[in-house]
Image (cartoon, rainbow, N blue to C red):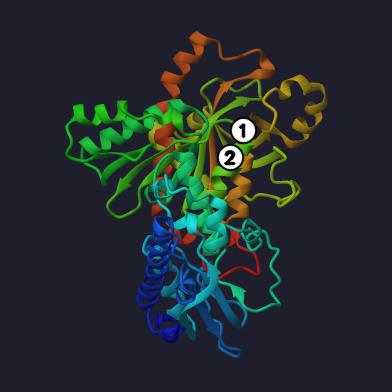
Amino acid sequence: MAVHTQYPRVVDTPEQAVEHLTLLYRRAVDTLSAALKRYLKDRSLPSSEERELFRYPELRLHWAQGNEFAAGIRAYAKVQVPGVYTVTITHPEAFRKYLLEQLRPLMRDFDLRVEVAVSDQDIPYPYVVEQGDELAGSGVTAGELSRIFPSTDLATVTDDTADGLRDWDEQPLPLALFDAARVDFSLRRLVHYTGADWRHVQPWILLTNYHRYVDQFIRHGLDMLIGESRFSAMVLPGNVTIQRGMTAEEMQTRVDSVLWHRYQMPAYHLKADDGDGVTLVNIGVGPSNAKNVTDHLAVLRPHCWLMIGHCGGLRQSQTIGDYVLAHAYMRRDGILDRVLPPHIPLPALAEVQQALQEAAAQVTGDRGDTLKQRLRTGTVLTYDDRNWELRWAQERPLINQARAIAVDMESGTIAAQGYRLRVPYGTLLCVSDKPLHSEIKLPGAAGAFYERAVTQHLHIGIAALDLLRGQLNSLHSRKLRSFDEPPFR
């Protein structure tokens, strides 16, 4: 139990930092888990020495007054004011790649003292209970456990740093947007909503509002695993895994076994050996779901999320099956107004816009004026009311002023969340009906439209992510960072 006498410990390399974070985290989790099991078995109370170990590890960066600022164009991994920067860390092994990507340039370009320590932040016991089976049949209630072991205190789980509510005149300063408790909170929610282990989520994310995109994503994934590609596995809801090398029949059997309807927002993960795979999440309909899932995906610090789904076309010149590339958003969803008022502009990210347009050209084979006939750039209007048409007389002036060309219920929310939580974002929608022009989705026409359009649309989204993979330095740009930003991306 002498761990506290060894820490805080100064480290010389990013690798040493992650190694010591991992050691402290493992020791804390193992000690808490063992104490919990003993209590469930014979009601043995943890010792005071054990209680001191039920804490997250902490990473500290000291940047002294007078040290020179390292010039460069990098938008992240830099300190801007002298002081001590800290953050508690959970699952350092799983976040190893991310931590090293942040620490290597920081420790290379700045004269820092880097320490690893035991924090004052307790690990809530529910976050070390993987399945919940340990509690079954023990006769112990959650209330009883929370009086003996650290429990979740949602009053301390906030997005204050992301929302700009931290006082930057106080020390220590935040090293990252999310601390360990906020991350653990979201990791558990991801498992609940998406139906698979959060570790399967890939850094390139597609979000959709129709299950038909899921069918095509699975078909695409099977093609990638059967043929030559960089992908090695696909994980479906329920942690059903399909591996390269399986027969086509075995793959299909596993697909057919998935009970995706048990999960509110099922996720599908096409994994690559280099960790640069693609995740598709069917978020369903509405801004509440869109905010919910992106709140939790953001703690994984993905490189990008794209909305690919259906929308209503608002212009007579549009045709069902046309594409809409959002370059502005009129937010009438209302869900983020308290933390990100609708008058705050959401910038279109040039790198994402260009990738989506180039991907559309590659997949459709159209360019120039021919592509413009099918792909229109403009404002997307996002509502929280599916039956907004019933207020058309009141809404028409605003739609006219915004020059909106499409309407949906998710895109504005997802873009706002990307802006708020510093995740690059973009939107490419497909016109599935024209509610203002008496062109609605009748059953027969809808079936033909879906069969024709969904596959191509999905492939455009995947191709755009492939293009963006080679542009990470420009993708993680200053456009999403404020002037008082934590060093970590």
- In the depicted structure, whether residue 361 falls above or below residue 103: above
Mark 1 closeness class: few <14, some 14–19, many ≥20 residues within 10 Å: many
Furthest residue toward top: 444
The residue sitting at 64% across, 35% down in the picture is 380
In-image side of 222 versus 350 (left or right): left
* Image quadrant containing the N terminus: bottom left
The residue closer to the viewer here, 326 or 56, is 56
Q: Position of residue 202 (x, y in %)?
A: 39, 49
Q: Which residue is mark 2?
A: 290
The residue closer to the viewer here, 28 or 205, is 28
Q: Which residue is mark 1?
A: 286
The residue sitting at 81% across, 30% down in the picture is 397
Q: Amino acid at mark 2?
A: Ala
Q: Amino acid at mark 1?
A: Gly
**Residue 95 seen:** yes
* Mark 2 touches mark 1? (CB < 8 Å): yes
Q: In the structure shown, which secondary structural element does the residue marked by tag 2 occupy?
A: helix
User: Marks 2 and 1, how far apart in space?
Assistant: 7 Å
Q: Position of residue 34 (x, y in %)?
A: 38, 63
Mark 2 closeness class: few <14, some 14–19, many ≥20 residues within 10 Å: many
Q: In the structure shown, which secondary structural element does the residue marked by tag 1 occupy?
A: loop
**Residue 301 seen:** no
The residue closer to the viewer here, 387 or 185, is 185
The quadrant where residue 217 appears: top left
The residue sitting at 45% across, 24% down in the picture is 453
In-image side of 64 versus 14 (left or right): right
